[in-house]
Amino acid sequence: MMKSFFQRYTPLQIAIHIYGWSALVLLIVDLLTDNLTANPIQALEQRTGRHAITLLVLALACSPLNNLLGWRELLKRRRALGLYAFLYATIHVLIFVDLDYGLAWSLIVQTIVEKPYIIVGVMAFLMLIPLAFTSFDIWKKRLGKNWKRLHQLVYWIAPLAALHYAWGKKGDFFALRGEIIRPLIYASIIVILLIMRIPQVRKALASVRDRIVVLFRKRAPQAKVNLP
Ligand code: HEM
């Protein structure tokens, strides 16, 4: 029974699902045990937002890391990571419109219009919706070439989410002080991941990988000889 479970799922797959669900379970446990700071709604909003952007960045990292490490399984895990990102983004938005604003739509619209960082968040969320719904194989087949083009929206969504994060924080952006550090780390990772997709950079990284592989292959027989 155990063997068949580990034969069916890879360690990476298991790790992704453990992260995806345990973060939600922890959130619910903290909510039920009153363990969510003096401002529980804000804490919920912040935690779901951070999980959403983390999962989004992980999804964005799969392709460049496959290129660098030759770990092809990463490509198969993009969908799960993206869907979990969408799950947390949806909960994040529901907390905002329901718990935070009590479904007072005119007030919600007013806040969206008044606060630029919310507009940016809304844009990121609206773009995530079609990606989540078309992430399944049937849509991949139906949309053909357009599927890839549609899913390239993630190159916009991730920077928008990072901007939403950084802009919503109080801090001195130019002095790199206060609460700006964490969003800046996310933004830097996103920039690096996007740079790694530029065709010339991609080729260079792939050739570095090939050279490392050749180096290891050359050393492998020697290592065997030296074994006791
Ligand atoms: C309709 C769309 C959205 C709305 C209305 C919204 C609203 C908010 C609000 C009100 C906050 C501030 C919470 C606080 O500190 O008081 C926030 C923070 C945040 N949101 Fe969103 N958001 C939206 C979409 C998104 C999306 C799509 C993502 C990521 C994929 C995201 C990620 C974050 C992050 C990372 C934070 C900061 C968390 C922290 O302070 O540690 N949001 N959002």
Image (cartoon, rainbow, N blue to C red):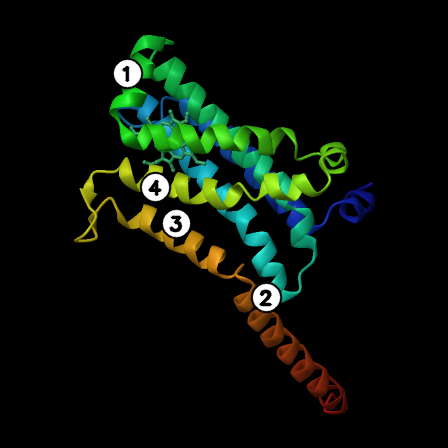
Residue 210 in the image: state x and y as whole percent: 66, 76
Q: Which badge, 2 or 1, is on the more N-terminal residue? A: 2
Q: Which residue is mark 1?
A: 110
Residue 169 in the image: state x and y as whole percent: 25, 38
Mark 3 CB lies closer than 8 A to ligand 1: yes
In the rendered structure, find residue 150 and report the number of the disc placed on it: none
Q: Which residue is mark 4?
A: 163
Measured in 3D between alpha carbons, the distance from the residue under mark 4 to the one under mark 2, in whole angstroms, is 27 Å
Measured in 3D between alpha carbons, the distance from the residue under mark 2 to the one under mark 1, in whole angstroms, is 45 Å
Amino acid type at image mark 1: Gln
Q: Nearer the viewer, mark 4 or mark 3?
A: 4
Measured in 3D between alpha carbons, the distance from the residue under mark 4 to the one under mark 1, in whole angstroms, is 20 Å
Label 2: which secondary element: helix
Give yes or no for contact between labels 2 and 1 (Cβ–Cβ under 8 Å).
Answer: no
Label 1: which secondary element: helix
In the rendered structure, find residue 68 and report the number of the disc placed on it: 2
Residue depicted at x 69% and y 58%: 72
Q: Is residue 122 left or right of residue 6?
A: left
Q: Which badge, 3 or 2, is on the more N-terminal residue? A: 2
Q: Residues within 10 Å of mark 3 (few under 14, many from 20)?
A: many
Give yes or no for contact between labels 4 and 2 (Cβ–Cβ under 8 Å).
Answer: no
Q: Which badge, 4 or 1, is on the more N-terminal residue? A: 1
Foreground pick, 218 / 165: 165
Measured in 3D between alpha carbons, the distance from the residue under mark 1 to the one under mark 3, in whole angstroms, is 28 Å
Q: Residues within 10 Å of mark 2 (few under 14, many from 20)?
A: some
Residue 138 in the image: state x and y as whole percent: 76, 32
Q: Which badge, 4 or 3, is on the more N-terminal residue? A: 4
Measured in 3D between alpha carbons, the distance from the residue under mark 4 to the one under mark 3, in whole angstroms, is 10 Å
Q: Quadrant of the N terminus?
A: top right
Q: Is residue 220 above or below residue 65?
A: below
